[in-house]
Image: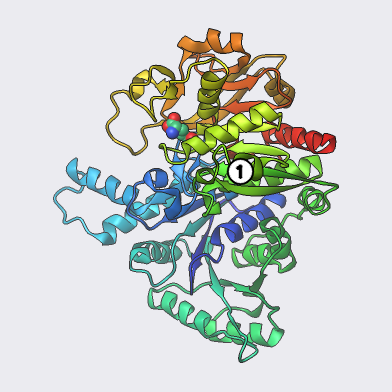
């Protein structure tokens, strides 16, 4: 590999939702499978400092990194594909860029200059792009620019890319992801939107090197040549990205289209390393040839927008493949569950997962779902709010504490079995102030958690303000709910299990953030395994 770090920018044209994140992650995977060290970064043009304060309906799930950054869900794809953790540096928003520039201005660092979008904002964007490159941990930095070219808010990012292309001509390329729509009435694929989108980039001084064309139909050689000619790219740099059965097919499809080879060629990388796709193919084979199927309810209040639970859904794919079964998620709105409907909604399923969340909407439905799982012996897995509600349900219905609650739902609850952490009591700002990121957890032997992890110490990621109230530990354990995971530094309860139940496990942390194709998460694997066992007994 050459000494210089190579920068690959991925921009989007024509429309949003073309899957820049998946293309970026797939290219990164192919380069990684050739033995290169790769990282991916997402630049988001919105003004929020991070997506932590965004409602999931706005932007899907908020993904949390090891270092506690609340980030865009695309970082989840990066980690699931690459099996390498990301960090705050991998996600930058316009809000963060402006915040940093304004802080510098307040400190007088601009020495009396007028602070402007060009050069100050663009310099800050360039700095954020190059931070990852400066670590010399990577051979390639792939930077995905959020939004679509032509958006007003994307302009400073495109300008920063233009400048970097100029400064580091040898070491940068731009991949433009675009759409080739099919007009049924005309029976034709149309290239004009792509031509216009490239023209918009050119107006901003950026000539893409490679075009990745999303399409529902095969692109003919003739059509590829036409796109190449009108967009100033070589014909081999017109890459077809046809709709795939699963996102995990995309690296294979991109390899067949030689996207990684063209990238190495354009970046003048000599002595190209060979690719080894075997492990990835193994996973795909297991995923696509299940030997059985389980049906698991995902109970949450944002189920209309499945992106709200992206990492959970993907974790089920990884855990399903590990168990060689297909996991069908039964998306279940917590507001649709009540004592009258619970049997009809959840009876007959092989597992019930109660999802993370905030606030009291849909809480009663979650409690009914948990009670049903506990009493009927259906495997149960609760995550974060799901764990907190499992605690409340157990206190109310097993320990005879009808007024048990989380203080998130009732501030002055008589029996606050879930309550605010001491350090949270003085917190005023909402952004970035939860308990965030990776913390250790000690696992008790002789527990389902230990059977799953096969380890006494694990590290898992958190995102919450409320906690199990340790004043109640003894009472819970006496009644049959055991705390099997404890933070060794501050004794916070991280995992609970119900003793006399085939599988009732809930965690305060979010295991879904750490499940990857190559490392399916042990708690998901064991939950799916329990669901398989339950389905066979039924
Ligand atoms: N609302 C709960 C808390 O803040 C749970 C958060 C979550 O599920 N991520 O503690």
Q: Quadrant of the C terminus?
A: top right
Q: Which residue lies furthest to the left in this view?
A: 112
Task: Point out residue 44 in the picture as x, y percentages from the top left corner.
Answer: 41, 55
Q: How is the image coloured?
A: rainbow
- In the picture shown, does residue 65 fall above or below 239? above
**Pick the front one: 201 or 341:** 341
At 55% from the left and 42% from the top, the residue drawn is: 337
Q: Can residue 38 be seen in this view?
A: no
Quadrant in which ligand 1 is drawn: top left
Label 1 crowd (10 A; few <14 / some 14-19 / many >=20): many
Q: Nearer the viewer, residue 370 or 222?
A: 370
| Mark 1 element type | strand
Q: Disc 1 designates what residue?
A: 298
The residue lying toward the viewer, choosing from 294 and 190, is: 294
Q: x, y percentage for residue 51?
A: 41, 47
Residue 370 at what x, y percent from top left? Answer: 59, 31
Residue at position x 64%, y 47% from top? 314
> Quick one: 340 or 109, which is closer to the camera?
340
Q: Is residue 347 visible?
A: yes
């Amino acid at each position: 590999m050459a000494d210089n770090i190579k920068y690959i920018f991925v921009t989007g044209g024509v429309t949003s939702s073309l899957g820049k994140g998946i293309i970026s992650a797939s290219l990164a995977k192919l380069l990684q499978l050739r033995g290169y060290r790769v990282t991916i970064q997402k630049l988001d043009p919105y003004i929020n400092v991070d997506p932590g304060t965004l409602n999931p309906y706005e932007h899907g799930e908020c993904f949390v990194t090891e270092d506690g950054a609340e980030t865009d869900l695309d970082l989840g794809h990066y980690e699931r594909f690459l099996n390498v953790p990301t960090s705050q540096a991998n996600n930058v928003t316009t809000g963060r860029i402006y915040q940093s520039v304004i802080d510098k201005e307040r400190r007088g660092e601009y020495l009396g200059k007028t602070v402007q979008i060009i050069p100050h904002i663009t310099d800050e964007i360039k700095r954020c792009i190059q931070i990852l490159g400066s670590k010399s941990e990577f051979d390639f930095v792939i930077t995905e620019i959020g939004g679509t070219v032509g958006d007003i808010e994307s302009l400073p990012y495109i300008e920063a890319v233009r400048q970097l292309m100029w400064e580091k001509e040898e070491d940068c390329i731009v991949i433009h992801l675009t759409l080739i729509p099919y007009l049924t009435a005309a029976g034709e694929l149309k290239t004009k939107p792509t031509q216009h989108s490239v023209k918009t980039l050119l107006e901003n001084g950026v000539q893409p090197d490679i075009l990745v064309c999303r399409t529902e139909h095969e692109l003919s050689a003739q059509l590829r040549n036409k796109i190449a000619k009108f967009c100033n790219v070589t014909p081999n740099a017109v890459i077809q990205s046809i709709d795939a059965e699963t996102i995990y097919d995309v690296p294979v499809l991109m390899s067949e289209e030689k996207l990684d080879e063209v990238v190495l060629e354009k970046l003048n990388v000599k002595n190209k390393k060979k690719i080894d796709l075997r492990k990835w193919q193994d996973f795909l084979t297991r995923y696509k040839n299940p030997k059985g199927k389980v049906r698991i309810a995902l109970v949450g209040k944002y189920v209309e927008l499945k992106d709200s639970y992206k990492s959970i859904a993907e974790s089920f794919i990884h855990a399903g493949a590990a168990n060689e079964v297909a996991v069908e998620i039964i998306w279940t709105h917590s507001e649709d569950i009540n004592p009258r409907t619970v049997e009809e909604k959840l009876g007959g399923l092989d597992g019930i997962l109660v999802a993370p969340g905030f606030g009291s909407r849909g809480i009663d439905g979650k409690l009914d779902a948990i009670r049903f799982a506990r009493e009927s012996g259906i495997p149960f897995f609760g995550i974060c709010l799901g764990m907190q509600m499992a605690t409340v349900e157990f206190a109310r219905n097993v320990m005879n504490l009808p007024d048990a609650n989380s203080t998130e739902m009732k501030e002055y609850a008589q029996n606050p079995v879930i309550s605010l952490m001491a350090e949270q009591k003085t917190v005023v700002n909402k952004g970035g102030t939860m308990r965030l990121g990776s913390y250790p957890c000690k696992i008790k032997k002789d527990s389902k958690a230990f059977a799953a992890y096969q380890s006494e110490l694990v590290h898992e990621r958190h995102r919450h303000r409320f906690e199990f109230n340790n004043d109640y530990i003894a009472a819970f354990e006496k009644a049959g709910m055991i705390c099997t995971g404890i933070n060794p530094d501050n004794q916070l309860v991280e995992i609970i299990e119900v003793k006399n139940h085939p599988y009732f496990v809930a965690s305060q942390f979010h295991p879904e953030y750490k499940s990857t194709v190559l490392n399916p998460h042990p708690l998901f694997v064991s939950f799916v395994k329990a669901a398989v066992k339950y389905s066979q007994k039924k």
